[in-house]
Image (spheres, rainbow, N blue to C red):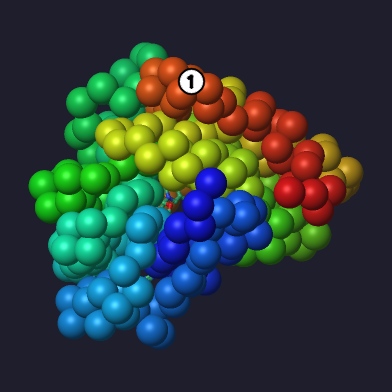
């Protein structure tokens, strides 16, 4: 495959780093960090990306602190919606394929079934709304776009649920975890490899990419401490007992019709967690 120049926004984030770790030979990656390219600043986005003339833009930059978004909605829309608008406009100008990363939080979680790509979004918190508005900007402004929704991302070193549970398990004898909210824990390296496959195929549209299977926060925490062999008890609590600014969807489980049609299926979430905790990719 001929070499293609690929810009990654939010390159310091956990997915941005995984994309760089798993980069295929055909990709000439240009990582952009917030300090070079603040996506809320249209002039900075144009000045950084236009001269690069990328073939692909993997837009990973986002404000992912869901509770902080709830407390500061304008900043959430600025980064997660307007930021996509700026990047999508430049992608359109240079004729790049824009791959925008979105979230399971665009759904309200009221369905009894996992959400596929053609389910109707209806967010219940500011983060979800801001990401949905970002999706709409990508669809409206850049004809060559792919929206990839994912969930519950983690790696071995960033600040995320896995590293938080590992830290708490060393500080406390009992961890209380929510048992009635569900999603698909997804290892960044598995998602990154699937994104590179999608990018190499040059396909457009909306895709759900998550590790297979699903778990509650409680299931996920139990698996982490079991695999890491940490002597800590994990007790189930209802979401109603855990006060937080934003309400996550009760059912945040994604499934995919579109990715398997391309031959893309991510590994089982527990296998992925074992690999991650062993320090493998
Ligand atoms: N984390 C999850 O569980 C999850 C679940 C579903 C979907 N997603 C989506 O997946 C994508 C990647 O998430 P992630 O977990 O890798 O997030 P992350 O680790 O929080 O990384 C996000 C990156 O975006 C950068 N950023 C924030 N504001 C910016 C701005 N104004 N301009 C430029 N860069 C900015 C951050 O820069 P700094 O390093 O300077 O802070 C950070 O490097 C995001 O689109 C997110 O919405 C994440």
- What residue is rendered at 65% in x and 29% in y? 267
Residue at image x 22%, y 77%? 46
Q: Quadrant of residue 32?
A: bottom left
- Where 202 falls versus 55 (above or below)? above
The residue shown at (78%, 39%) is 274
Q: Is residue 111 visible?
A: yes
Residue 213 lies, in percent from the top left, at 58, 23
Q: Quadrant of ligand 1?
A: bottom left
Q: Please identify the residue farthest to the front as the structure is shown.
A: 2
- Residue 235 % position (x, y): 67, 36
Disc 1 CB within 8 Å of nearest ligand 1 atom: no
Q: Decide which of 54, 12 is in the foreground and name it.
A: 54
> Which x, y percent locates residue 185?
57, 38
User: Is residue 222 visible in the rendered structure shown here?
Assistant: no
* Residue receiving disc 1: 260
x and y, in percent, of residue 133 in the image: 17, 50
Q: Residues within 10 Å of mark 1 (few under 14, many from 20)?
A: some
On screen, residue 171 versus residue 152, left or right, reads: right
Which corner quadrant of the image does residue 107 belong to? top left
> Horizontal placement of 91 versus 212: left or right?
left
- Of residue 236 and residue 38, the one placed in the foreground of this image is 38
Secondary structure of residue under mark 1: helix
Check the image and name the residue furthest to the left. 140
The foreground one among 280 and 232 is 280
Image position of 222 (left or right of 34): right
Number of marks in picture: 1
- Residue 35 versus residue 200: which sits nearer the camera? 200
Q: Which residue is painted at 44% across and 77% down in the image?
A: 33
Relative to residue 193, is residue 244 depicted above or below?
below
Q: Is residue 126 above or below residue 266?
A: below
């Amino acid at each position: 495959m001929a070499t293609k120049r690929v810009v990654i926004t939010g390159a310091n984030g956990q997915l941005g780093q995984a994309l760089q770790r798993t980069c295929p030979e055909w990709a000439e990656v240009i990582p952009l960090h917030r300090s070079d390219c603040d996506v809320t600043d249209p002039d900075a986005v144009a000045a950084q990306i236009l001269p690069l003339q990328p073939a692909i833009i993997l837009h990973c930059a986002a404000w992912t602190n869901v509770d902080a978004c709830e407390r500061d909605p304008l900043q959430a829309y600025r980064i997660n919606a307007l930021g996509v608008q700026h990047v999508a406009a430049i992608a359109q100008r240079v004729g790049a394929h824009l791959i925008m990363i979105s979230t399971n939080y665009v759904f309200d979680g009221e369905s009894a079934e996992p959400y596929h790509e053609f389910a109707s979004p209806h967010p219940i918190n500011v983060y979800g709304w801001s990401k949905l508005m970002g999706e709409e900007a990508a669809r409206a402004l850049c004809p060559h776009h792919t929206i990839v929704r994912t969930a519950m991302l983690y790696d071995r070193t960033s600040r995320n649920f896995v590293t938080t549970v590992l830290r708490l398990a060393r500080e406390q004898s009992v961890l209380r975890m929510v048992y009635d909210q569900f999603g698909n824990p997804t290892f960044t390296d598995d998602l990154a490899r699937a994104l590179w496959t999608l990018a190499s195929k040059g396909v457009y549209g909306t895709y759900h990419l998550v590790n297979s299977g699903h778990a509650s926060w409680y299931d996920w925490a139990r698996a982490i401490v079991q695999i890491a062999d940490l002597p800590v008890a994990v007790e189930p609590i209802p979401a109603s007992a855990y006060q937080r600014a934003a309400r996550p969807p009760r059912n945040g489980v994604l499934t995919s019709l579109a990715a398997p049609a391309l031959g893309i299926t991510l590994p089982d979430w527990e296998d992925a967690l074992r690999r991650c905790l062993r320090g493998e990719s």
